[in-house]
Image (tube, grey):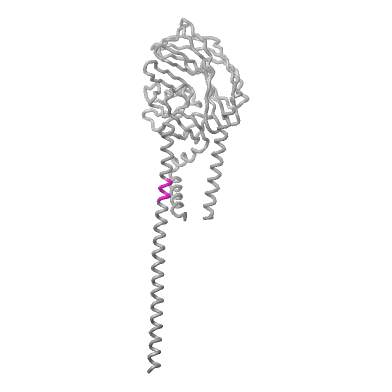
Amino acid sequence: MHSFGYRANAVLTFAVTILALMCAIASFSDNFNNPTPVAQVQVLNINWFQKQPHGNDEVSMTLNISADLQSLFTWNTKQVFVFLAAEYETPKNSLNQISLWDGIIPSKELAKFWIHTSNKYRFIDQGSNLRGKEFNLTMHWHIMPKTGKMSADKIVMPGYRLPEEYR
Amino acid sequence: MRMLTRQKEKKREKEKGRRERERERMEWIRESVASVRSIQFRQLLTQAVSLGLIVTSALIIWKGLMCFTGSESPVVVVLSGSMEPGFKRGDILFLHMSKDPIRAGEIVVFNVDGREIPIVHRVIKVHEREDTGKVDVLTKGDNNYGDDIVLYADGQRWLHRHHIMGRAVGFLPYVGWVTIIMTEKPIIKYILIGALGLLVITSKD
């Protein structure tokens, strides 16, 4: 009854239970954080805009992204994955989401940033619908916790438009 | 003469008592043997039941999780470093499969035809059809340089709904190392299973 094995088992079970409980509480404590992130994106230039040989439109652009995501960080945050996606509708597709740029923010100090970049991933449509197309740029973020529940949210920035002609 | 008969009687009585005592002793031994046997049988039975209980409760938890999350494998272990520094090798992900549409930024677990091991990567492009609601999805590992087209089957450019086993909703670090060690060094698994079985069988209660 009170052998070494029995006691070791009891101690181990108790330790694991406490650890699991602490993880759950840490994850739950994230709910008390009310973040107020801000983001701004400017399309500085359309570098080129053309129709690929097999018929899909492709565009390359230069972006100026500035954001302050410091309020997303809590003590249970390991990193924040942030990406900027172009979102638009076409007659064929009810939703197109194309990631243009992304980044990993490892700490709160680096969460206020400013970047000048051309799109990291190719902006290719399924078809040829991009001329004069109105689109949203959406700043998404995905919070990866040290442990527990992951969460995500976004800021939608509407009112961007591609040029009427290829260039 | 009288003396003789009395002595004989005494002797006979002594003999009788001895035999009786012997019989009692025999009976006692027989009884104790029987009781020991029955105890062992009962103990064996309880051990078998408790072993069965452990196995079935593990199964119940797993199947319950499957129902609850709607994913055929509710918990996966990260095997590669392609999502570092978010997910490291040996971390555990909890999956959830709902009817909600798949959107960019979500971390999904998918199976590619011709590949046995599922992959955990992030969705970077989504095209959802207006009429059928069919989705074309492109994924990429956060730590990889390029997107996943090279990982898909030959000629496959997009993932579809049926490739996706679930999306990651929760995260627990390090715990998955146990399974990684066990799959890579099966001896340790057998030793562990043997030791656990022995422990269950030999434990008194």
Q: Residue furthest right?
A: A109
Where A89 falls versus B29 (above or below)? above
Question: Visible in this render: residue A102?
Answer: no
Q: Nearer the viewer, residue B30 or A155?
A: B30
Where A133 falls versus B116 (above or below)? above
Where B27 falls versus B50 (above or below)? below
Q: Residue furthest front?
A: B2
Picture quadrant where residue B97 is located:
top left
Q: Position of residue A16 (x, y in %)?
A: 54, 42
Q: Position of residue B141 (x, y in %)?
A: 48, 26
Point out the stretch of residues depicted in magenta: B49-54
Numbered circles on residues, count? 0
Q: Residue furthest bottom?
A: B1
Q: Nearer the viewer, residue A167 or A109?
A: A109
Residue A89 relative to residue A2: left or right:
left
Q: Position of residue B178 (x, y in %)?
A: 48, 41
The residue at 56%/32% (across/down) is: A28
Residue A49 located within the stretch drawn in magenta = no
